[in-house]
Amino acid sequence: FRHGLNLLVGQSGAGKSRLVAALMAAWLRGDPTWLQRDLKGPPIADRHALIIGTDQGREDWHQTLTPVGLCTVLADGKAVQLHRRVTLYPMESGALLDADTMRMIRRWVAEHPSGMVAVDSLATCLPPGVDEDKASAAGPVHALQDAISGGWGVLTHHTRKGAGKEGNLGVGAGRGSGAIDAAVSRVIGLGLIHKMESGQSVPQESDPRRELLSTKRGGPTVHLIVSSDHSGAWDCHGSADEMKRQQRQERARANLTEEQ
């Protein structure tokens, strides 16, 4: 993830929201590293986060944020308290990437320079009449990029059908127009682990590991194997190079004839 706007692409259930919550928590705490990478930012007291989270309702966000310490269940067991440096607009708020929300984001960024803005997800936040399959879908993304100027953000997006099976997690994996990818600073793909079964690449839904691929402007391509547990923490298992080498061997073996 880089300074500027990052597009986090992945299929439903891959863990995009949980990954963003874990990153946000580590950054707000001032952890020096995350997923074995340096985690930089202003002094801890100056770190604030804004969530435009119309992909989930308030209760679901509480469940996403509580394991990483950004939401606390109060003594009565009925009420919860959000982290004092987190501002949340859940599904009930009806916030979209329209002119009103952009003005709100600009005001928030003016009050919290260098803050983190998370938008989850693009499909649920597009204003009425904006089609993600058309180049015009990049308009709200450009506006968001401009609104967070001076800070940084993560915009989640769903993969197009078949992208995971093709092994495509980076640029071009997201649904809709390619102009969406062009409007951001970095594209990060989060996908299930795939294995060859009977000559087919099959997603391993029971495998807690995920592929994390970071591409595009602002630095070299990074391809990692990561996983999360019940606590909401994510761990890095190193580069994906070895796993990819094994997958290539399995595909080659599956394509051999009996004689070969």
Image: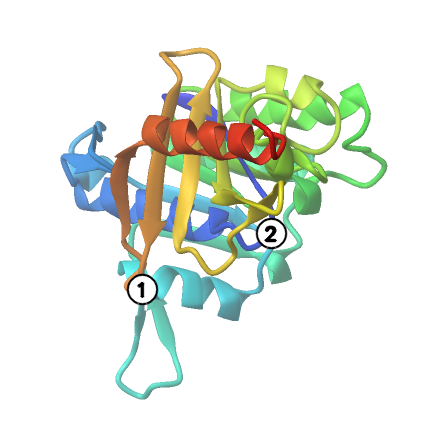
| Residue 121: image location, x then y, percent | 60, 44
Residue at x-position 16% and y-position 40%: 31
Q: Residue at x 64, y 23 (%)?
A: 172
- Where does the C terminus fall, quadrant-wise? top right
User: Residue 59: image x %, image y %?
Assistant: 50, 70
Residue 206 in the image, given as x and y percentages of width and height: 47, 60
Closer-to-camera residue (243/143): 243
Residue type for callout 2: Ser
Check disc 1 and give the amino acid type. Pro
Answer with the quarter of the image where residue 165 lies: top right
Residue 258 spot, x, y in % from top left: 61, 35
Q: Mark 1 points at which residue?
A: 67
CB atoms at circles 2 and 1 under 8 Å apart? no
Q: Which residue is drawn at 81% across and 41% down?
A: 128
From the viewer's perspective, tell me whether residue 67 is left or right of residue 38.
Answer: right
Name the mark nearer the viewer: 2 or 1.
Answer: 2
Sequence order check: which comes first, mark 2 or mark 1? Answer: 2
Where is residue 240, by image quadrant?
A: top left
- Number of labels in the image equals 2
The crowding category of the residue bearing disc 1, from other C-alpha atoms within 10 Å (few below 14, some 14 to 19, many at least 20), is some
Horizontal relation, residue 137 to residue 229: left or right? right
The N terminus - image quarter: top left
**Which of these two is toward me, 108 or 86?**
86
Q: On the rendered structure, is 186 left or right of 69?
A: right
Return the residue at label 2.
12
Residue 50 visible in the displayed image: yes
Report how far apart the C-alphas of labels 2 and 1 lie in the structure.
20 Å
